[in-house]
Image (cartoon, rainbow, N blue to C red):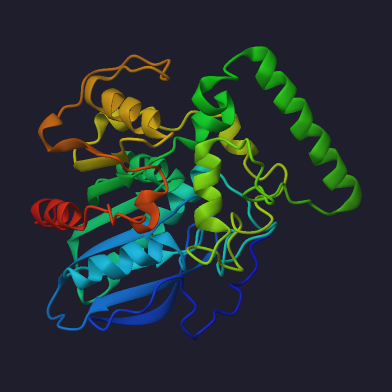
């Protein structure tokens, strides 16, 4: 059900203050599936002529008022026109049932953002890049593999959502038996939804936080459930995805062709990030056509010289959301990466 976009809040309600160096406005654009995506556009105050542009989304289950907006604003300060958008079914964008995810629809969200930017008179359509954060880092790689218009891609603290949904964390549930049990559970939830005409939510970040929670769960809590990153429209901050909202990711592997990405790619991870294996394995597969976690064996990348894996010393997964206490987001590196490759 492709409903029209919800009305967008016009007042500033982000988890970060507005920079005095950029102009900001709310915009919308359509996807080929008929959804209306809500977005924040950031433009440097000294903008002139046709400029380089970057579309940004993530983390998976977050909204543009959180990390993606922070990235967009900071990159606009550095001279880029930037677009932070809410994915389909999420935040202020359209789509029912709410908080549903799909590899093809989410990839299309990125491609539609590129469509929107390419048609703007103040954007050079030959100089468009994307940034994906957390689960949207993997989606960004999939988009880059699909669309040569994307000239540079940064995947920050990335997840492969198809791998984690199908195999569990650290591939602990990578077996037919475990997947069959998970499929039965999802099938039961679908039957309930069909009978009641109502979906139920699976829950966002656990609250209250158990004392014995893994460190990465504590890190998520510290971001999504505290004033640092909490937002009322964020699924991760509240009741999460609906109970079978990510089923499509569990039954696919969607990074099959990233070894054929010819455009520039930067994969950045914190040294201490629990998710680091996603980025390292994706980088190895992108470069060599084979890696742990990838059943396929394909040819090495035809343009390896513009690919980079950056490991940030001491940083955790969520430190790359907003910088953490040590302000570890490599803004200078992102600026130089996009300037060098959007030309």
Q: Position of residue 254 (x, y in %)?
A: 45, 32
Q: Position of residue 175 (x, y in %)?
A: 61, 14
Q: Is residue 304 left or right of residue 328?
A: left
Is 10 in front, or is 342?
A: 10
Could you tell me which quadrant the N terminus lies in? bottom right
Instruction: State the residue at coordinates (22%, 25%).
Output: 287
Residue 109 position by quadrant: bottom left
Instruction: State the residue at coordinates (53%, 31%).
Output: 164
105 versus 74 height, above or below: above
Q: Position of residue 117 (x, y in %)?
A: 30, 67
Is 290 in front, or is 278?
A: 278
Could you tell me which quadrant the C terminus lies in? bottom left
Is 58 in front, or is 301?
A: 58
179 versus 211 height, above or below: above
Residue 123 visible in this rendered orientation of the protein: yes
Q: Is residue 126 left or right of residue 2?
A: left
Instruction: State the residue at coordinates (62%, 49%).
Output: 205
261 versus 179 height, above or below: below
Is 223 in front, or is 24?
A: 223
Instruction: State the residue at coordinates (67%, 42%).
Output: 210
């Amino acid at each position: 059900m492709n409903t029209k976009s919800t009305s967008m809040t016009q007042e500033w309600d982000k988890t970060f203050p507005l920079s005095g160096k950029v102009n900001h406005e709310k915009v919308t654009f359509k996807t080929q599936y008929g959804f209306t995506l809500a977005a924040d556009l950031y433009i440097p105050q000294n903008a002139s002529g046709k400029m380089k542009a970057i579309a940004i989304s993530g983390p998976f289950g977050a909204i543009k008022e959180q990390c993606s907006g922070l990235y967009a604003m900071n990159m606009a300060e550095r001279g880029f026109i930037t677009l932070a958008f809410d994915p389909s079914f999420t935040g202020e964008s359209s789509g029912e049932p709410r908080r549903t995810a799909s590899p093809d629809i989410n990839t299309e969200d990125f491609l539609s953002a590129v469509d929107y930017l390419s048609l703007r008179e103040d954007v050079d359509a030959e100089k468009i890049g994307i940034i994906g954060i957390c689960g949207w880092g993997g989606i960004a790689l999939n988009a880059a593999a699909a669309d040569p218009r994307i000239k540079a891609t940064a995947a920050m603290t990335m997840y492969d959502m198809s791998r984690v949904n199908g195999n569990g964390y650290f591939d602990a549930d990578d077996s037919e038996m475990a997947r069959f049990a998970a499929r039965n559970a999802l099938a039961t939830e679908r039957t309930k939804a069909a009978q009641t005409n109502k979906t139920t939510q699976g829950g966002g970040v656990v609250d209250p936080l158990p004392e014995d929670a893994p460190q990465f769960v504590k890190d998520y809590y510290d971001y999504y459930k505290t004033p640092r990153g909490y937002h009322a429209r964020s699924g991760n901050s509240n009741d999460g995805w609906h109970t079978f909202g990510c089923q499509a990711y569990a039954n696919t592997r969607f990074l099959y062709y990233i070894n054929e990405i010819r455009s520039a790619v930067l994969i950045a991870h914190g040294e201490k990030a629990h998710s680091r294996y996603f980025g390292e394995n994706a980088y190895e597969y992108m470069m060599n056509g084979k890696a742990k976690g990838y059943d396929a064996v394909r040819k090495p990348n035809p343009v390896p010289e513009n690919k980079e894996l950056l490991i940030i010393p001491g940083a955790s997964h969520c430190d790359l959301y907003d910088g953490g206490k040590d302000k570890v987001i490599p803004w200078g590196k992102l600026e130089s990466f996009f300037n060098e490759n959007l030309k």
